Image: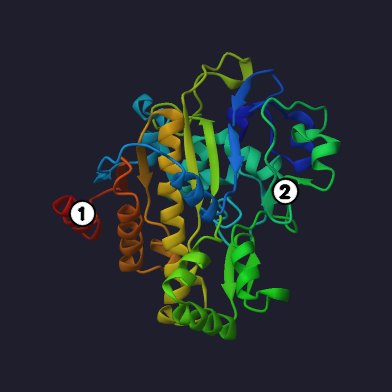
């Protein structure tokens, strides 16, 4: 029995079966037994949109803090003290947790528990949000359509014919969210000339990677900032935590309808480039990979600033995007975190970089440097 079955009380045989047995009401999934599990709200804002919203705030400047936390992100999600916090999640550009570029959304989300990394652990920790992104998110032209608050409908996923007549509900092998699409349009990725997207994994061509690098290197500082602003991230806002005590289990008994309601958090789903999956040398990826990392970390902290106003919780947990099997160099990641922190240093954030298993020397050095400069 997978986490999906334990949470919903039903199997995960096919998208058609799931949409027949589960439904969306307001910000919740309704399971066959009648229990509701909150997925919250899904948005895919551009960094430029988040920047604009933050710039309009009139809060008093207070210095942000930063620290390293050695922990399992599942336990952090389950901790009631983190209600309302933001968790950055390492994902793909489709906001899902594919174990490889050949895995399609039709394979389901129950298989995530077979992946020991922290990204899938975060996705399972807010299980209703993950089910929603895979099976019910209304998508048009690679972008999520925001549902109106309180909207209810008899159509699958809560869609209405007036609002979503051109939408596909949920993601499929041939129809997926793509948070890089706007950036691709600006760079000239027509007919996949520069890169292809395969189930959330971005694979540049040899000529495409060289052209992108040249464009980035030749851009003025404002021009690079403009490119950064085109990247989108996924925000699963006010999603219910569906694990207890950090274990791989559901709070209470979902099949009986007596499951206790969990606290809520927000998650920022971000992707780095799959450097280690490509055939090009690592250094040829550097300009493009750094651009993506810079945008992802800045967008996450901007979202955390807005979340602090909304939830009253100024804590944001960061992960090392693109490290490990994705092959992004540690220094690229550290530099992106430092840049994003500098841009939000006066916004009273409590930034916590999560290291799994043991302290990371590069993270510890970054924290020491930023703490001493504050």
Q: In this view, does 356 lie to the left or right of 218?
A: left
Q: Which of marks 1 and 2 is nearer the N terminus?
A: 2
Identified at 43% across, 33% down, the residue is 309
Which image quarter is the N terminus in? Answer: top right
Q: How far apart are marks 1 and 2 (CA)?
A: 40 Å
Q: In this view, does 95 lie to the left or right of 150?
A: left
Q: Residues within 10 Å of mark 1 (few under 14, many from 20)?
A: some
Q: Is residue 116 visible?
A: no
Q: Is mark 2 on a helix, strand or loop?
A: strand
Residue 131 position by quadrant = top right
Up/down of 176 relative to 17, above or below: below
Q: Where is residue 6 in the image (x, y as percent from the top left)?
A: 58, 29
The mark found on residue 102 in the picture is none
Q: In this view, does 233 lie to the left or right of 188?
A: left
Identified at 73% across, 40% down, the residue is 13
Q: Mark 2 points at which residue?
A: 139
Q: Name the residue under label 1.
A: 370
Q: Where is residue 29 in the image (x, y as percent from the top left)?
A: 66, 28
């Amino acid at each position: 029995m997978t986490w999906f079955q334990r949470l919903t009380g039903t199997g995960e045989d096919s998208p058609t079966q799931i949409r027949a047995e589960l439904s969306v009401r307001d910000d919740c999934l309704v399971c066959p037994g009648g229990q509701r599990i909150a997925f919250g709200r899904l948005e895919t804002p551009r960094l430029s949109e988040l920047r604009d919203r933050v710039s309009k705030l009139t809060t008093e400047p207070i210095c942000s803090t930063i620290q390293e936390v050695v922990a399992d992100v599942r336990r952090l999600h389950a901790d009631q003290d983190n209600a309302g916090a933001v968790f950055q999640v390492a994902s793909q550009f489709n906001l899902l947790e594919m174990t490889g570029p050949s895995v399609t959304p039709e394979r389901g989300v129950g298989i995530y528990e077979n992946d020991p990394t922290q990204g899938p652990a975060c996705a399972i920790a807010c299980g209703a949000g993950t089910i929603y992104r895979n099976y019910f998110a209304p998508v048009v032209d690679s972008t999520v359509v925001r549902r109106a608050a309180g909207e209810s409908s008899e159509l699958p996923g809560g869609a209405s014919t007036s609002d979503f007549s051109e939408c596909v509900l949920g993601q499929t092998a041939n129809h997926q969210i793509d948070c890089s699409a706007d950036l691709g349009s600006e760079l000239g990725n027509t007919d996949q000339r520069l890169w292809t997207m395969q189930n959330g994994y971005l694979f540049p061509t040899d000529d495409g990677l060289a052209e992108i690098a040249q464009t980035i290197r030749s851009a003025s500082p404002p021009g690079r900032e403009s490119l950064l602003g085109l990247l989108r991230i996924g925000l699963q806002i006010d999603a219910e935590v569906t694990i207890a005590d950090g274990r791989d289990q559901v709070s209470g008994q979902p099949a009986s309808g007596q499951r206790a309601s969990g606290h809520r958090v927000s998650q920022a789903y971000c992707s780095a480039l799959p450097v280690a999956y490509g055939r090009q040398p690592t250094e040829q990826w550097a300009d493009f990979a750094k651009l993506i990392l810079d945008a992802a970390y800045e967008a996450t902290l901007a979202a955390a600033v807005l979340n602090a106003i909304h939830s009253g919780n100024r804590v944001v947990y960061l992960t090392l995007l693109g490290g490990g099997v994705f092959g992004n160099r540690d220094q690229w990641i550290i530099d992106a975190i430092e840049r994003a922190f500098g841009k939000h240093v006066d916004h009273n954030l409590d930034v916590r970089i999560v290291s799994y298993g043991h302290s990371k020397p590069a993270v510890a050095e970054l924290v020491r440097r930023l703490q001493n400069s504050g």
